[in-house]
């Protein structure tokens, strides 16, 4: 049977441009059956039927003269959200991580906020689904080293040469051989929660970069962030409890 590049077939199926089709695949929302299409230019059979998962809308949690708090959907980069809203980023979330994302509106506030981050005075709570049974609280205190490749993509690992990284894990629910947990981070290293959970044998479901089983997304959600006088909360989306 003849084959064609995935993005070209998707553009025909969805009646969109080739560029838009490629962007959807790059965002990680295009599937063949239960398997994510990873390479836009990959060859697939011409009778292939795609499933495209919906990207939730960007929601504004709060705004004043200093700060904008956003409920970031999965599958959008933090930079894409900042561009759409029109203000620069104060923190970042990975593309498939949803939840509280902060933008700043003036440099005076940015400097105050950076000082809070540097001095570990920011509360950052996440919810995650992980592999295995987590039945007790765990403190992970392992330094993390982050390396970037030529394309600027980051990969982190536990290393004595890394920077201090502390994560507190609390169980919420055990369902079969997976667990829903709360992770509170004292520091903010790249991929910190993902690396720390891998290091204790409980990788995040969907986090194939760090040993997790495939799912429709990395099952990590920024649920609460408190800084200075502000406290912001984001609830998981309706699909989050079905990893």
Image (tube, rainbow, N blue to C red):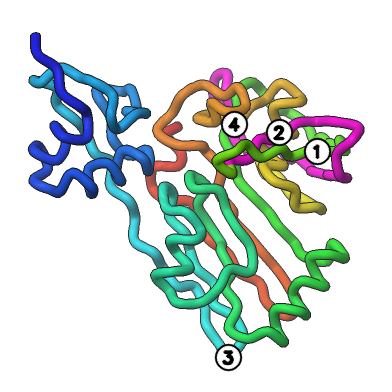
Q: How far apart are the alpha carbons under marks 4 and 2?
A: 9 Å
Q: Identify the main secondary structure in magenta.
A: strand
Report the residue marked by disc 4. 204
Q: Nearest the camera: 169 or 142?
A: 142
Q: Secondary structure at mark 2?
A: helix
Q: Nearest the camera: 18 or 142?
A: 18
- Which residue occupies the extreme right position in the image? 160
Report the residue marked by disc 3. 65
For the C terminus, the image quarter is top left
Asked whether disc 3 touches disc 4, contact meaning CB atoms under 8 Å apart, the reply is: no
Q: How far apart are the alpha carbons under marks 1 and 4?
A: 17 Å
In this picture, which residue range is highlighted in magenta?
153-180
* Residue 181 placement: quadrant: top right
Q: State whether residue 2 appears in this view.
A: yes
Asked whether disc 2 touches disc 1, contact meaning CB atoms under 8 Å apart, the reply is: yes
Q: State whether residue 235 appears in this view.
A: no
Q: How far across and how far down the image is residue 168, in percent?
A: 79, 43
Report the residue marked by disc 2. 195
- Which residue occupies the extreme bottom position in the image? 65
Report the residue marked by disc 1. 144
State which tag comes first along the sequence, 2 or 1: 1
Q: Is residue 79 above or below residue 177?
A: below
Q: How far apart are the alpha carbons under marks 1 and 3?
A: 35 Å
Q: Residue at x 72, y 42 (%)?
A: 192
- Look at discs 1 and 4 and give the one toward the viewer: 1
């Amino acid at each position: 049977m003849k084959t064609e590049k995935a993005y070209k077939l998707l553009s025909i199926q969805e009646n969109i441009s080739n560029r838009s089709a490629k962007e959807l695949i790059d965002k990680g929302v295009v599937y063949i059956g239960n398997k994510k299409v990873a390479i836009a230019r990959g060859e697939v059979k011409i009778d292939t039927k795609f499933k495209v998962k919906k990207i939730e809308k960007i929601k504004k949690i709060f705004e004043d003269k200093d700060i904008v708090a956003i409920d970031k959907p999965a599958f959008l980069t933090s930079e894409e959200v900042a561009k759409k809203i029109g203000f620069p980023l104060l923190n970042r979330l990975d593309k498939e991580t949803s939840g509280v994302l902060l933008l700043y509106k003036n440099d005076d506030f940015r400097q105050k906020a950076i000082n809070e981050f540097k001095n570990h005075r920011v509360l950052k709570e996440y919810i995650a689904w992980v592999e295995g049974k987590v039945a007790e609280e765990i403190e992970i205190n392992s330094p993390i080293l982050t390396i970037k490749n030529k394309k600027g993509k980051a990969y982190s690992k536990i290393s004595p040469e890394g920077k201090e990284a502390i994560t507190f894990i609390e169980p919420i629910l055990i369902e079969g051989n997976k667990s829903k947990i709360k992770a509170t981070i004292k520091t903010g290293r790249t991929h910190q929660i993902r690396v720390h959970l891998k290091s204790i044998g409980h990788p995040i479901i969907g986090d194939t970069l760090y040993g997790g089983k495939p799912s429709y997304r990395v099952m990590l959600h920024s649920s609460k962030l408190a800084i200075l006088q502000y406290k912001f909360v984001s609830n998981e989306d309706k699909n989050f409890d079905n990893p």
